[in-house]
Image: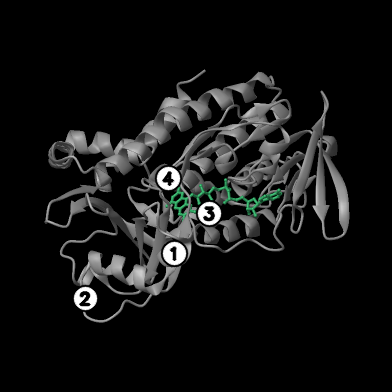
Amino acid sequence: MSFGAGNRPMPQIGERDRVVIAGAGPVGLVAANVLADAGVGVTVLEAEPRLPENLRASTFHPPTLDMLSKFGASRRLIEMGLVAPRLQYRDLAGWRADFDFKLIADLTDHPFRVQCEQYKLNHVLAERLARFSHARLEFSSPVSDVEQSASAVTVSVEGPAGRRTEVASWLIGADGGRSRVREALGIRLEGFTWPERFLVASTPFEFADVIPDLREVSYFADPEEWFFLLRVPGAWRAMFPTRQEEEDAEILSDESIQRRLLRVWKKPGAYEIAHRTLYSVHQRVAETYRKGRVLLAGDAAHLNNPLGGMGMNGGIHDALNLAEKLVRVLCGGADESELDRYERQRRSIALEYVNNITIANKRNLETRDPQEQRRWRETMTHTANDPALAKEYLTRVSMIASLRKAAAIQ
Ligand SMILES: Cc1cc2nc3c(=O)[nH]c(=O)nc-3n(C[C@H](O)[C@H](O)[C@H](O)COP(=O)(O)OP(=O)(O)OC[C@H]3O[C@@H](n4cnc5c(N)ncnc54)[C@H](O)[C@@H]3O)c2cc1C
């Protein structure tokens, strides 16, 4: 007998049913907490010596907050982050369309986005996992190879002390975009990589003092160079596309970042730059999410551009869907075909929903065609001004619609 996070006695299933998860990112840690809550023995293998703290996603959508509240994590994210009740599209000429999440207050317990760095969620989830005697989180444990039989998966780990193996009933590959698990299984990540990369620069400068009616999440359409402003505690993060011919050092130089920030707001003097990142942007989905006893989730299964903040959120939705099905297979006597349903439900969302929305977001912000620009602005203005259309729009961009669509897939 072991005890759950609420000190409830839990049925302990056999050690041979242990699930191994590669990767202690948000996806691996959410899946681990669901399994641990159900009394399933779980080992999370993380390549790094500690939880990585690099700045990546920072937007939590309403249904993701609804899901994370079962771990007490939404409350912690709200305390550590910033509540964004509105979303805005605008341009430098003064056009804007505002959406208020209160229109979806009947569909979610969290009618807002929360802006908080994703690594803070990872700490909350890892702390919670540590309370379970049947859960282990092992650092400096990079998965190097995977072999499987009809009844078990053998995972090789290449740690500082040498090579060792872990045997599990199931393996979840939540080891990110460059997933070794996916590679070991020979699963292709199909799609394309955008020719331009995206630059993210943070500054403590208070844009809201100078840009009228600026919301916490603001997408600026511009044919010359679109940008995106997102407020996080103590700073604004600005995201820009870069040109193909620009070299890394040039893009990341103070001069080029100042030039880009001065297009956002032409202020006297230089901006203080708190942080800068340059990264490649992909639209790719794994050709399958399941091979025998191995399942992929999160960035290991799909990558998309960050316009819409759907990468981490979609990954957390995968983790919940998959871990709950694994619990039913291991503890509830459900048939293994339940896990094929995970692929049917979540892969189709990555292909048809997340890909379409994020590609459309990028195209609408960057288009140089004056007719397309006008059409999009008119559509967004009309949508924002009609409560029924605005509600439908918010249901889509907050990913509530994607979860409903997935749930309807048998
Ligand atoms: C700059 C930036 C901004 C972003 N903004 C957003 C946003 O606003 N909203 C959003 O939803 N998404 C956003 N994303 C995407 C988001 O960060 C990812 O979708 C999210 O991190 C995916 O989580 P994950 O757990 O699948 O993978 P990761 O967070 O990448 O975690 C994978 C973990 O696996 C570990 N690992 C790797 N290889 C191995 C191995 N062989 N063995 C064991 N462990 C291994 C890694 O160290 C890591 O800890 C952004 C990404 C970037 C880069």
Residue matched to label 4: 195
Residue matched to label 3: 72
Residue matched to label 2: 267
- How dense is the environment of label 4, judged by Cα within 10 Å: few (below 14), some, or many (20 and up)? few
Disc on the earlier residue, 4 or 1: 1
Mark 4 is on which residue type?
A: Pro
Q: Quadrant of residue 367?
A: top left
Q: Mark 4 or mark 1: which is in front?
A: 4
Measured in 3D between alpha carbons, the distance from the residue under mark 3 to the one under mark 2, in whole angstroms, is 42 Å
Disc on the earlier residue, 1 or 3: 3
Assess whether mark 1 and mark 2 are in contact (beta carbons under 8 angstroms): no
In the picture provided, is 152 more to the left or to the right than 300? right
Q: Residue at x 65, y 43 (%)?
A: 179
Single out the residue that lies furthest toward the front. Answer: 245
- Find residue 234 and report its horizontal and vertical position in percent: 38, 72
Q: Is mark 4 within 8 Å of ligand 1?
A: no
Mark 1 is on which residue type?
A: Glu
Q: Which mark is residue 6?
A: none
Measured in 3D between alpha carbons, the distance from the residue under mark 1 to the one under mark 3, in whole angstroms, is 11 Å
Q: Which mark is residue 79?
A: 1
Measured in 3D between alpha carbons, the distance from the residue under mark 4 to the one under mark 1, in whole angstroms, is 38 Å
Assess whether mark 4 and mark 2 are in contact (beta carbons under 8 angstroms): no
In the foreground, 312 or 409: 312
In the foreground, 347 or 79: 347
Where the N terminus falls, by quadrant?
Answer: top right
Asked whether residue 248 appears in the rendered view, the answer is yes
- Find residue 252 and report its horizontal and vertical position in percent: 43, 67
Q: Mark 4 or mark 3: which is in front?
A: 4
Q: Mark 3 or mark 2: which is in front?
A: 2
Measured in 3D between alpha carbons, the distance from the residue under mark 2 to the one under mark 1, in whole angstroms, is 32 Å
Q: Residue at x 21, y 76 (%)?
A: 267
